[in-house]
Image (cartoon, rainbow, N blue to C red):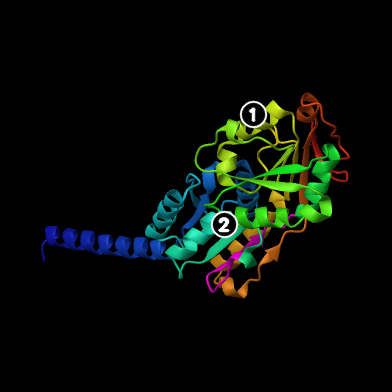
Amino acid sequence: MGLGFKLKRVFFLSAAVMLVLSQGHAASAKTVGAIMTADIQYYRDIHKALVEEMGKDVEIVVQKPMPDPMSWTNAARKLVGIGASVIICYGAPATLTVMKETSDIPILYAGVYDPDSMNISGKNATGVSLSVPVEKVLKDLSGISKFSKLGVIFSKSEKDTIIQARDIKKSEGALGFQSVMFGIGDQVNKDDIKGVDALIMTTCGAAMSNIKDIIGAARRDKIPTAALIGGGENAGIILTVTADPKEQGAALADMLKKVLGGAKPSEIPVRQSKQLQITVNVKEAKACGLNASANTGGGGARVIE
């Protein structure tokens, strides 16, 4: 046997070993995908808390679709296509879309309002609900300024926001107001938002993408604003009451560790968020001639002055 043949044989054996090792590494490596609609600040805060809990143990591929059905579908298909072992969904629209695209890949969600009412459950989905006491938010908003006509910002493309709008309407009799529904799309014309003396924004991705126009309408009429999702307070939302994103992210990380360790989503109960994050933009309230303080929301609020 010649030296050249021996060298070739060693080379091929080495190449075969490297191939087996690389295949073994690829098989053990797990890709985690995430869908973060419109790169919304609230979802970024949840994701940051998740990453801090996970450390460097996992790399997450993040998709940031616009808040429309086609974008959610494309993002979901990309993550399914790359072979994600787990897909994390922030918000109900992303969760519902991924559930349509796969029944095999584990799905973990956060920032989802009342998941039971949307049948967000099953063998491959679990997560953390966004529990916000709507009637409390409305009472706190009326403490800033009494209102008789409340504008409700929601999207017909986002099922959870429709449910929130209905929950708000249920409080009309008890609190003595009339709901005026503003179903928005990709674009918002602030001139269309009128005829109300207060505004409340649901967990609407389309609204967050058009927050400047919504705030513009409120400033024009000097009316109080509230939101059930964080991220709009620095833009001018006066009262924000939502589930604490740090709690959401930490709970999500615990679930992700369990799933990566071999647990099935069906074995992990859905968690109810317990802590609220309240933010009061006193500066914006004063600019609109409204009354808001650190005591708004019952105290303990983060205040923007």
Closer to the chain start, of discs 2 and 1, is 2
Quarter of the view holding residue 211: top right
Q: Is the N terminus in the top left, top right, bottom left or bottom right quadrant?
A: bottom left
The residue sitting at 78% across, 27% down in the picture is 283
Quarter of the view holding residue 4: bottom left
Q: Nearer the viewer, residue 58 or 220?
A: 220
Does the stretch in magenta take in 122?
Answer: yes
Does the stretch in magenta take in 25?
Answer: no
For disc 2, the marked residue is 159
> In the rendering, at what x and y percent does residue 150 appear?
72, 43
For disc 1, the marked residue is 216
The residue sitting at 77% across, 27% down in the picture is 288
**Residue 103 left/right relative to 304:** left
The amino acid sitting under disc 1 is Gly
The amino acid sitting under disc 2 is Lys
Q: Nearer the viewer, residue 279 or 32?
A: 279
113 up-or-down from 206: above or below: below
The part of the chain drawn in magenta is 118-132
Q: Is the C terminus in the top left, top right, bottom left or bottom right quadrant?
A: top right
Q: CA distance from mark 2 to mark 1?
A: 26 Å
